[in-house]
Image (spheres, helix red, strand yellow):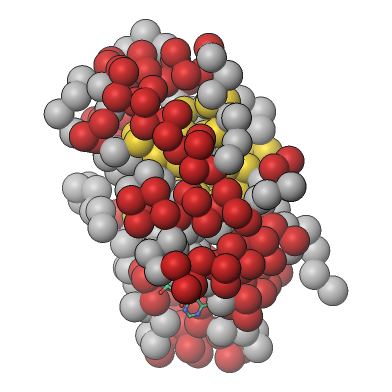
Amino acid sequence: MTSAIPTTTFPSAAQVPVLGQGTWHMGERADRAKEEAASLRHGLDLGMTLIDTAEMYANGGAETVVGEAIKGRRRDAFIVSKVLPSNASTTGTIRACEASLKRLGMETIDLYLLHWRGSYGLDETLEGFERLQQAGKIKTWGVSNFDVDDMEEISALPGGKQVATNQVLYNLTRRGIEYDLQPWCADRGIPIMAYSPLDEGRLLNHPELVHIAKAHQATPAQVALAFVISRPGVIAIPKTSSRQRVEENRASADIHLTLENLSALDAAFAPPKRKKPLEMI
Ligand code: NDP
């Protein structure tokens, strides 16, 4: 029997499952859009209610797919989208968000992120986020691809402590954040959203993953996801357009890695011993 997906809580008190759904590369081909929306809907049915998207993905095409997926069931979903750094001036952020809302077919984005740091000052973007919040167009805001020094900088700004999340690259082969960024966020009650939790599929043939997967009658992808969501305050957002893989990914939340499994994973994918600059894709 499957149990409910564990949850984590954003500083706003919104509770979300630690397993969500990514959408990068969705919306790139019109002939696949139906299947992509159907896989997201299937994920919603299975409790993966957090959906991550961005204006960047397929130039807005992924947001259109998400809009299609949640038609008639907005309340079932927690939607995260992102503004491109090149749009992240105060008025640019507002305009970008309004365009995203139109594509998504909704009135409010649950969590709106700066995709990565660009040339606009963080204070300018933050002002855009605050105005959007006041207008009811976003509920909360956060950042993505921010290292510890960037987090320090944004939280020192007026209103900056409202930062709800930092979405970063995190999987078994990219464990650098365990050294400093993860503890920094945990100390402040800020959940981390782990993107590319399967390293875009690259890590799935690793012999140790295959070995542990066999022992759990699971797949390497499930073990890779179970590892990511075993970390407190970490949300994994794997992307798949396949209904079968949606089910496979959902079932990763039912796998309990033993201490022995975790040490074997540490031996195969060494945790960081010193500060590493944040990696990004
Ligand atoms: P993932 O690690 O989620 O891997 C996705 C790839 O793995 C796809 O090719 C998918 O193929 C395949 N896959 C999914 N499930 C399985 C499975 N069970 N077994 C085997 N293969 C599988 O990489 P992403 O880069 O897509 O990251 C996830 C999400 O994170 C993105 O979609 C996006 O929303 C977000 N992201 C954010 C970034 C940022 O800068 N903030 C950067 C990168 C990603 P298929 O669809 O055919 O199943």
Q: Is residue 137 above or below residue 280?
A: above
Q: Is residue 271 visible?
A: no
Find residue 137 and report its horizontal and vertical position in percent.
Answer: 54, 24
Relative depth, front residue between 103 and 251: 103
Occupied quadrant, residue 62: bottom left
Q: Is residue 237 left or right of residue 24?
A: right
Q: Position of residue 168 (x, y in %)?
A: 36, 48
Residue 147, image x, y percentages: 27, 39
Q: Most extreme residue toward the left, as rendered?
A: 119
Q: Nearer the viewer, residue 266 or 41?
A: 41
| Tally of numbered discs | 0
Which quadrant of the frame does ligand 1 lie within? bottom left
Horizontal and vertical percent for residue 246?
A: 61, 72
From what the image shows, is residue 42 above or below residue 210? above
202 left or right of 81 in image:
left
Q: Residue furthest front?
A: 30
Quadrant where the N terminus sits is bottom right
Evaluate whether residue 61 shows in this view: yes
Residue placed furthest toward the right: 1
Of residues 245 and 27, the one nearer the viewer is 27
Quick check: 202 above or below 102?
below
**Is 228 drawn above or below residue 14 in the view shown?**
below
The C terminus - image quarter: bottom left
| Residue at image coords 80%, 70% | 2
Residue displayed at 75% across by 61% down: 45
Which of these two is toward me, 33 or 204?
33
Q: Residue at x 55, y 33 (%)?
A: 109
Among all residues in the image, which is located at the extreme top? 158
Q: Is residue 278 left or right of residue 42?
A: left
| Residue that appears at 63% across and 67% down | 38
